[in-house]
Image (cartoon, rainbow, N blue to C red):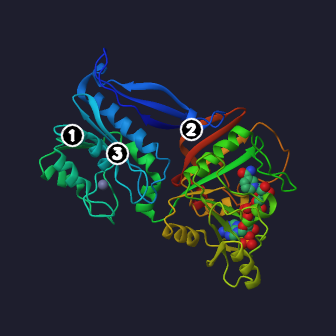
Amino acid sequence: MPDVAVRPAIDGPDRHGPRACFRKMVIRPDDPRPRSERFGVLSCVRPEAREGPDVDDEAWMRLALTLAESTRAKTHPNPRVGAVIVKDGRVVGLGAHLAPGEAHAEAHALHMAGEAARGATMYVTLEPCNHHGRTPPCTEAIIRSGIRRVVVAMEDPNPDVEGGGIERLREAGLSVDVGLLRAEAERLNAPYLTAVAARRPFVWLKLAMTLDGRIATRSGDGRWVTNEASRRRVHELRDLSDAVLVGSGTVLADDPKLTARLPGARQPIKVILDGRLRTPASARLFDGAAPVLIFTAPGADEAHKARLISRGAEVIEVPLEAQAKTEARLSVRAVLEHLFRRDIRLLLVEGGAKVAGAFWSAELIDRVTVFIAPKIAGGGLSPLDGTGVLKMAEAVSLVDVAVERFDGDLAVTGRPDWATNGERRAP
Ligand SMILES: NC(=O)c1ccc[n+]([C@@H]2O[C@H](COP(=O)([O-])OP(=O)(O)OC[C@H]3O[C@@H](n4cnc5c(N)ncnc54)[C@H](OP(=O)(O)O)[C@@H]3O)[C@@H](O)[C@H]2O)c1
Ligand SMILES: [Zn+2]
C-alpha cells in the first residue's frame, strides 16, 4: 500500500466535458528519484462520465481524502482534513489543513473559490468546526460564502471542541449529508480518534525479521535484517510519526540515530526507555536532529543524568510497573501519558524485543508492520519478549491486513484485534 500525495492542477472543461485535474505522487520506497520529481501524469476526475449524483459525490470526497492524506500527518495534534468545493461539476476550490495554528482546509478552499462558492457543494473529510479555536469557526465562513450543500465524511468526536458544526449548518438552511466514505476518513485520522477515545498516542509497532522470525542473531547483531527498499520505507514511517521509541537494549546493541533520512523529512522526537540509565552519552542519537527524551526509573544516577542532559537529552522519571512474572519495568502507560501531554499523536515503536513485548502485553499497540526478509538466521532473538498464549487458537489476529513488497522483502501491516487475545483469558 504505497502512500499517495496529490498536487492539484485545476483545469476547466475540455472537449470531453468538465474535469478536475491533479498530479498524483505514488511514494514507493524503491523509487530512486527525488520526491520533487515523482509527481506523475495528470489525472482528471470527470463526474459527468459517471452515473448518478451519488457516484459523483464519492469521486469528490475521494479527492478531499487524498488532499488530507497528502499532508503526511504534519497537522498533529490536529486532525488531517481536506476540502473540495464543486460547482456545476467543476472544482472551484481545494484545501487541506497543513499545520496546527494554520488555516483549516475549509478556509483554504473557500478562499480559492471566492464568489464561485455561491450555490456550490463542499466536500469535507471531517465535520466543520463551530468554535473559536486558534482560527475562527469554519461553519460561519461556509454559511457566509453562500455554499448550499455540505457533504461530510465523519462527525468530529472531539469533546474538547464545542461540536454542533453539522447542526449549525442545517440551522442556517444548508443541506448536509454525513457519512460518505466514513471508514476511509476514520482510517486516515486513526491517531486523532485514538487521542479522543483513549487520550494517548496511536502506537504503531514496526519490526524487521528473518523468515525464521529473528530480529537479531544470538550475538545481538541486528544490522541489517532487511534490504534497502524496506529501510527506506521505515524512514517514511518515521517521517509520518511524531516520535520514535526504542529500548536501552537497542541503543546499546545498534547505536541507532533514529532519524528520518529523507529529503524534507520532519524529524520525529527520539524516545528511549531506559530504567537503569544505560544510554551512553556518546550515543549516535545525540546528533541534534530532534529532541531526545529518556524515560528512566526514579532515583537515577545523578552524574550520568547530568551527562545526558548536557548532550541535550531530557531525562524523565516515571514509575516502575511490576509485570507478571518479569522484573519491574517502566510503566509504558505512564510513558504514553507523558508523550500525549506533549502533543505526540503517532508513536512508532521500533523495538527491541523487550520493549515490543511490554507494549504488546499491555495491549497498547494499534497497528503492526512486520518486515520479513527472505533469509534464515537459524536461531537468535524473537521479535516479542513475553509469555504468549498457550494455544494457537488464542493468538491475536490482525485485521485490515495489507501486504506490500519491497524488492525481495515483504511487509505485513494490520491492526491487532485484542478481543481475540487468548492470553487475557488464560488462568
Ligand atoms: N530487527 C528489528 O526490528 C530490531 C529492532 C530493534 C532492535 N533489534 C534488536 O533487538 C535487540 C535489543 O532488544 P532487547 O530486547 O535486548 O532490548 P530493548 O527492548 O531494545 O530494550 C530493553 C531494555 O529497555 C529497558 N526498559 C525500560 N522500560 C521497559 C519496559 N517497560 N519494557 C521493556 N524494557 C524496558 C530495560 O532496561 P532497564 O532494565 O534498564 O530498564 C530493558 O532491558 C538488539 O539485538 C537489536 O539489534 C531488532
Ligand atoms: Zn475549522
Q: Position of residue 309 (x, y in %)?
A: 69, 76
Quarter in which the C terminus is drawn:
bottom right
Of pointers 2 and 3, the one earlier in the residue sequence: 3
Q: Amino acid at mark 1?
A: Ala
Seen at 31% across and 64% down, the residue is: 133
Q: Secondary structure at mark 3?
A: loop
Q: Amino acid at mark 3?
A: Thr
Seen at 26% across and 62% down, the residue is: 131
Q: Secondary structure at mark 1?
A: helix
Instruction: Say left or right for 282 vs 27.
Output: right
- 404 up-or-down from 319: above or below: above
Q: Which residue is mark 3?
A: 125
Separation (CA) of disc 2 from disc 1? 39 Å
Q: Which residue is mark 2?
A: 402
> Where in the image, quadrant-wise, is ligand 1 located?
bottom right
Please tell me how many numbered marks the rendered image carries: 3
Q: Which residue sits furthest top?
A: 15
State the residue in front, 379 or 317: 317
Asked whether residue 1 is in view, the answer is no
